[in-house]
Image (cartoon, rainbow, N blue to C red):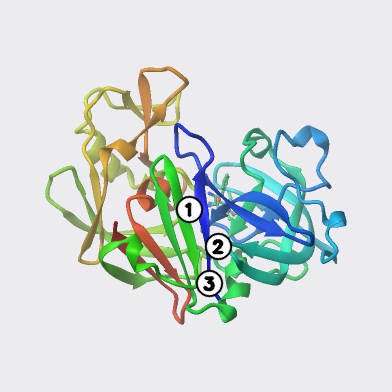
């Protein structure tokens, strides 16, 4: 089997996150979920949520699905790096993404979501595509959609073709040669942290020379920005007129009309270049002439994150073989 579905920016002006339409249950209920390689819970806004926590999201109503079954006495509770959180109970139901169906997929129904989820009216939940060891369901942890679908897939892979301010694609079970140029460079993945953790071979700022240095980080489709060690940030923003690290805004900001260099990172011998337009991320507040950078420091996270700002500069293959690997290509 294979599947292919759109990755749609939730906001027309800034790539805060991408959502993908999925069908759950019988008759199918369509929700728009944030496919997130940085976590492993599939959870949805549901009919169990208090109305006060719903602001325009589409909810999953298990009672309206003839194939929904409660997973009795199972609960979940998750927290994310940005401090957001959610928790609830668990059903299993039919789950379809772009024509690829998994029966008896664990669908975690929210009974409580934190305010940042309530505020994001275009995200109806998350589909965790990390390793199932990260799943928070107790007493028995559940498998991700990818782990459930893998045995039925033509190939045990999914690919991310995210795009700057436009609609991209997630493909499941096949690699679409039309979506990239040149060759795909695969590097090993360390699965023990539960994320798609890999080592980049170094970086370059603009047209400067390449600095060969190992950068261990995670490929996280559910994180908007790129978070890297402070020394790399200093090297980058030193080249940006008026750039400062702002305590007020919690990161590097600069005048929106400043000229920004591109940023290149290494995947083995290969090089992926993030255009400067991706790094001038957004005004700090609507209409401001001060912009927030798409590259920020990872020092407060304790982990480097290659989020959407980097992923949308490439075609990325999440290969779930034995052992798993991650592949990067230009496009
Ligand atoms: C503070 C929580 C720490 C980071 C840790 N949680 C995690 O690692 C979870 C699974 N993953 C995440 O918090 C991050 C990876 C960060 S590593 C510090 N990825 C998922 C996140 N972008 C999902 C999201 C999407 C939209 C809106 C908000 C959040 C834990 O539970 O211990």
Answer whether labels 2 and 1 touch (C-beta < 8 Å): yes
For label 1, the crowd category at 10 Å Cα-Cα, with few meaning under 14, some 14 to 19 and many 20 or more, is: many
* Percent of width and height locating residue 7: 50, 51
Task: State which quadrant residue 259 falls in.
Answer: top left
Mark 2 is surrounded, within 10 Å at the Cα level, by few (under 14), some (14 to 19) or many (20 or more) other residues, namely many
Tell whether circle 1 marks a residue whose Cβ is less than 8 angstroms from ligand 1: no
Mark 3, residues whose alpha carbon is within 10 Å: few (<14), some, or many (≥20)? many
Quarter of the image that includes the N terminus: bottom right
Tell me residue 196's x, y (percent): 46, 64
Secondary structure found at label 2: loop
Q: Are marks 2 and 3 in contact (CB under 8 Å)?
A: no
Between 126 and 59, the residue placed more toward the observer is 59
Q: Quick check: 65 left or right of 97?
A: right
- Local SS, label 3: loop
- Residue at image mark 1: 221
Residue 49 at what x, y percent from top left?
81, 43
Q: Which label sits in the foreground, 2 or 3?
A: 3
Quadrant of the rendered structure where residue 174 is? bottom left
| Residue occupying the point 47% across, 21% down | 285
The residue indicated by pointer 2 is 129
The vertical placement of 169 against 296, above or below, is below
Q: Which residue is mark 3?
A: 2
Quarter of the rendering occupied by the C terminus: bottom left
Q: Residue at x 60, y 64 (%)?
A: 134
């Amino acid at each position: 089997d294979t599947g292919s579905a759109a990755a749609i920016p939730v906001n027309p002006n800034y790539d805060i996150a991408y959502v993908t339409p999925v069908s759950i249950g019988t008759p199918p209920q369509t929700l728009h979920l944030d496919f997130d390689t940085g976590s492993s819970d599939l959870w949805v806004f549901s009919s169990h949520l208090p109305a006060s926590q719903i602001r325009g999201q589409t909810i999953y109503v298990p009672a309206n699905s003839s194939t929904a079954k409660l997973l009795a006495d199972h609960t979940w509770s998750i927290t994310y790096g940005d401090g957001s959180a959610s928790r609830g109970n668990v059903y299993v139901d039919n789950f379809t993404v772009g024509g690829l169906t998994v029966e008896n997929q664990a669908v975690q129904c929210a009974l409580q979501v934190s305010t940042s989820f309530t505020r994001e009216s275009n995200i109806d939940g998350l589909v965790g595509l990390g390793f199932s060891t990260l799943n928070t369901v107790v007493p028995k942890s559940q498998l991700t959609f990818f782990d459930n679908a893998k045995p039925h897939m033509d190939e045990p892979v999914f690919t991310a073709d995210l795009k700057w301010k436009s609609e991209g694609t997630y493909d499941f079970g096949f690699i679409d040669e039309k979506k990239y140029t040149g060759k795909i460079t695969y590097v090993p993945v360390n699965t023990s942290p539960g994320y798609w953790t890999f080592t980049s071979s170094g970086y370059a700022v603009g047209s400067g020379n390449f600095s060969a240095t190992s950068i261990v980080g995670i490929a996280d489709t559910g994180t908007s920005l790129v978070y890297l060690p402070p020394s790399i940030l200093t090297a980058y923003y030193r080249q940006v007129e008026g750039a400062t690290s702002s305590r007020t805004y919690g990161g590097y900001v600069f005048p929106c009309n400043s000229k920004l260099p591109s940023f290149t990172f290494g995947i083995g011998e290969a090089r992926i270049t993030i255009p400067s337009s991706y790094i001038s991320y957004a005004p700090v507040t609507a209409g401001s002439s001060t912009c927030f950078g798409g590259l920020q420091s990872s020092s407060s996270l304790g982990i480097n994150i290659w989020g959407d700002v980097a992923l949308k500069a490439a075609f990325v293959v999440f290969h779930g073989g034995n052992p798993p690997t991650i592949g990067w290509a230009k496009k």
